[in-house]
Amino acid sequence: MPLDAEIYGHKEAITPSLAASTALHTALVLCVLFLPGMLSHSGENWGNNGSGGEPGGAMSAHLVSGIPLPPNPQAKPENVLANESKGLSQSVPAPRAKEDDKAIAIPDRQTKVKPAKEKAATTVPGRELPKQKPAIATPTHEQPHEMAKVNNTVPFGAGGPVAGPYTSFQSGSTAGGLKFGEGGNGTFGSRFGWYTDAVARKVHQAWQSEVNPSISSAKRVYILFDISRSGTPSNVRIEQSSGIPALDISAVRTLQRIDTFGPLPREYNGSYVSVEFWFDYRR
Amino acid sequence: MKRFVALAAVLFALVLPALSQDWIRTGTGVGGEKIRLAVADFKAPSAEAAALDKTFNAVLFNDLYQAGIFDMVSKSFYPLAAIGAPADVHLDAWGAPPPNAAMLAFGNLAVSVGTLQVQGWLFDVKNQQNPQVLAKQYRESATDENARLIAHRFADEIIFRLGGGLSGIAETKIYFVSARTGHKEVWAMDYDGAGQHAITRLGSISLEPRVSPDNSRVAFASFFKGGPNIAMWSLELGRLVQFPSFGGTTLSPAWSSDGTRIAFSSSRSGDPEIYVCDQNGNNLKRLTAYHGPDVSPVWNPKTNAQIAWVSGRTGLPQIYIMDSDGTNVQRITEQGYAVSPSWSPNGQFLTFAWVRHYGPGAPGASDIYLMDVASRQWVQLTHDGGRNDFPSWSPDGRHIVYQSTRGGGEQIWSMLADGSQQTQLTFGGSNSQPNWSWK
């Protein structure tokens, strides 16, 4: 009996097993890579330890926004008392470029150019020369070096909100605006700017987007509603859809979430005010 | 081989959809900016009015600051010229830096023949053509208390106009339990801690006072006649009024927002359960029937169709909600030790005291939390400040009052409902279990 048995002689076909093992390990590696991400997005994790969520997570912004409080003011890096800005009304004009003496002036399109032969017309005795038309001044696009001082300019820092029928707000990826139009002479916004601001603030606080975050932008949606004398919003309807139902519904629900804007100013005589509310969605 | 490939395919099928379903409800409504408000000291021409004027100015400024919706302009930025009437106002000076105010409140205060007269205005500084938003005149007998009262009223008017129709809380009261006389009695104070005074003088133990929505009665748990039972105190008559005894340990009364019903906890059947009765004690109805203590009910004040309460049916106390007929029971908290729920006036939030990690050596303490009832998302409002318990909402939904031991003994504190502007209201003795009035 030979002592050395042929143990290396037997060759097993390992190719299928190797391929299967490789595939399984690849799958496992992928699972390990993606599983934490999958678990972290499983919903219902707010104080809900039983459903697999991790307690102690952060909160989303809209939770506190349900409280009728404005957010805490964000620190402004700019010191309004020690600002080197020249202000909005006194911008410094750019230095005028030196004109090239050899440059040929390009006539303006409005200027009528007379034919050259007219210039060569000779004087005929007994006949008066046709009257020369006064030269048309070529309009120039040069700006005066010093800006004219206008009384309605707003000095830096004293602007504040525009007291008009329009008002708007912006926050992160969202922006919205209001336009007041009422049965009277259309001066509601300018007379009661404090009220339009209050309406904008309240709509802003009540806004909760239910739009799929994969949507990066949408057309502007227009919502119409009325505010009665008691301040109750009513008759909420979509004037122009954004084409994204979730955005339209979010906008309508925002108005439905508001009980009152406060009574209309006593000095206003109309029975209600119509408001057009637009909303832009950009992400 | 085919088996492994199939397994891998199944794993991919499980992983990929989970990644693509990352659907979140984005919150972008973070509110507009606060209104920048300047409040010029009211002009008091006579020396007689000067003392009252000092009180008035301090209370008015504090009320508007506590409202939580204004960015108050520091008084050091104000123009030096005193203003007492619209003719004195130079809008440009107030609208430009440094005050850069958007709104300006001002007025005058005079005393004549024992009568205090106050005229107040609110101007929109940026609106040169029509600056006047509000003009008010008040007349009361000339006392320090009335100077405070008028300041509260004028502040509430401003908050109502500029706060989107939500009334201010400057005239509201806070009821609480104080042991400063040696017995636990029901006390009351203004929302800012002023005017603290005893309501009951029973010489017994009174707990968990709850004022009725019309501010006419206070229901509380009392040991006055033996075991703890619900007692009813008339604020108009200044004495106890009739309320039936249900037997057992009867605690934690809670008014519905329409004032017609009272929910409470009673062990009359042996086990503490939640009951509901009419405001006079009739039509008793039991809502819970499960082994384990059920206590501290509160109504959803927006609808009166739901009740939140504390139940120990699964061990440690947790917050539950149910419909007001006892159906549709849902557990709100899933861990720790959660007690003392209070439902916000708009029905959206519950606030409660929660020890999230309960047990020996566990980190954290009893803190006040806020939870969105629909989404169950929560946020912690107090941090690292002793034991905090018994939160109660203000009627405007912007404030919460609670008890805390952060300063040593038990005292009453208030804060904005986002956890900011925490203010201590009581300082003497032991004060606990606050309840904010409805108006």
Image: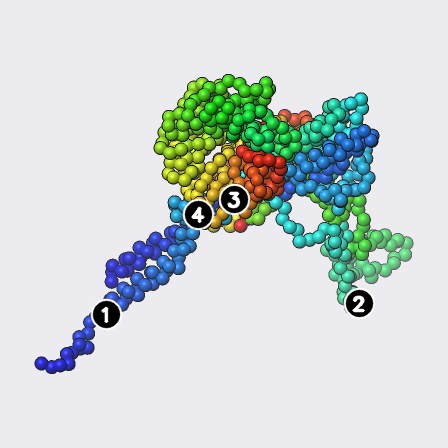
Q: Nearer the viewer, residue B418 or B252?
A: B252
* B338 on left or right of A187: left
Quadrant for residue A107, please give it: bottom right
**Residue A270 position within the rendered picture, expressed as x and y whole percent measured from the top left:** 65, 26
Mark 2 or mark 4, whichever is nearer to me: 4
Q: Amino acid at mark 3?
A: Gln
**Residue B389 position within the rendered picture, expressed as x and y whole percent measured from the top left:** 52, 38
Q: Amino acid at mark 4?
A: Pro
List the residue tagged with mark 3.
B380
C-alpha span from label 3 to label 4:
21 Å
Q: Give the residue drawn at x 68%, y 30%.
A: B152
Q: Residue furthest left?
A: A1
List the residue tagged with mark 4.
B360
Q: In which quadrant will I find the N terminus of chain A?
A: bottom left
Q: Give the residue drawn at x 72%, y 39%.
A: B38
Q: Nearer the viewer, residue B241 or B203?
A: B203
**Residue A57 position within the rendered picture, expressed as x and y whole percent measured from the top left:** 48, 49
- Residue A14 is tagged as 1
SS for callout 3: strand
C-alpha span from label 4 to label 1:
57 Å
* B249 on left or right of B406: left
List the residue tagged with mark 2.
A101
- Would residue A209 be seen by someone viewing this image from the given angle? no
C-alpha span from label 2 to label 4:
92 Å
Q: Check disc 3: other Cα within 10 Å, few if <14, some if 14-19, many if 20+.
A: some
C-alpha span from label 1 to label 3:
59 Å
Q: Give the residue drawn at x 44%, y 32%.
A: B295
Q: Check disc 1: other Cα within 10 Å, few if <14, some if 14-19, many if 20+.
A: few
SS for callout 1: loop
Tell me the chain of label 2.
A
* B364 on left or right of A124: left
Against B268, is A98 above or below? below
